Image: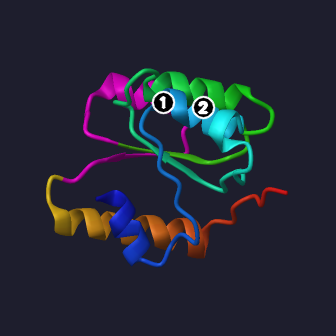
Amino acid sequence: MIQEALEDQSFLSTFHHVQNGAEAIQFLKKAGPYRETDTPDLILMDINMLVIDGHEALKTIKSTPSTKHIPVLILSTPNRKEDILKAYRGQTSSYFIKPDDIFKLYDLAEIIKIYWSNTATLPKNE
C-alpha cells in the first residue's frame, strides 16, 4: 500500500520493492539478479522484515561505503521506544509509525514526498 501511496504522490520516478531484508542487502550490493540496478537515492523499509530484520539491514547499509550516505526511512508498525531508539542509533534518517488507516497512509506519503523531494536535498548517486 505504501508503494501505491508514494506513486500516487508522483514522488518516485522508480520504485524498487524487495521481499525481505536479505533481498534488500542483495539489491544494494548489486548482487545476483540486481547486478544492473541503479543505487537508490532514498531507502524506505520496515523493521519487521523476514530473513534479515530492518535493524540488521540498517546496520549493513550504514557500514557499507557504497550505501552509507543513502538516507534510510523506517516505516514500521512497532511503536516501541527501544525499536525507535535502536533505529536512530543505527543512523536512520526518520522513523514513521505505519498508520492503521489508508487515508492516513496517503497523508504520510504526502508528508514524506514534501520533505524528501521539496525540502531536503538528496545526494545523487553516480
Along the viewing direction, whichever of 13 and 69 lies nearer the viewer: 13
Could you tell me if residue 66 is visible in this image?
Answer: yes
The residue tagged with tag 2: helix, strand or loop? helix
Q: Quadrant of residue 51?
A: top left
> What x and y, as percent, mark residue 39?
71, 50
Along the viewing direction, whichever of 7 and 99 lies nearer the viewer: 7
* Residue found at x 21% / y 53%: 99
Horizontally, residue 92 falls left or right of residue 126, namely left
Q: Look at mark 1 in the image and give the residue it sits on.
A: 21
Farthest residue to the right: give it: 126
> What x and y, as percent, mark residue 56?
52, 21
Could you tell me if residue 91 is visible in this image?
Answer: no
Q: Do the residues bearing badges 1 and 2 touch, measured as CB atoms within 8 Å?
A: yes
Q: Which mark is residue 25?
A: 2
Residue 93 in magenta stretch: yes
Horizontally, residue 84 falls left or right of residue 100, namely right
Q: Which segment did they paint magenta? A: 76-99
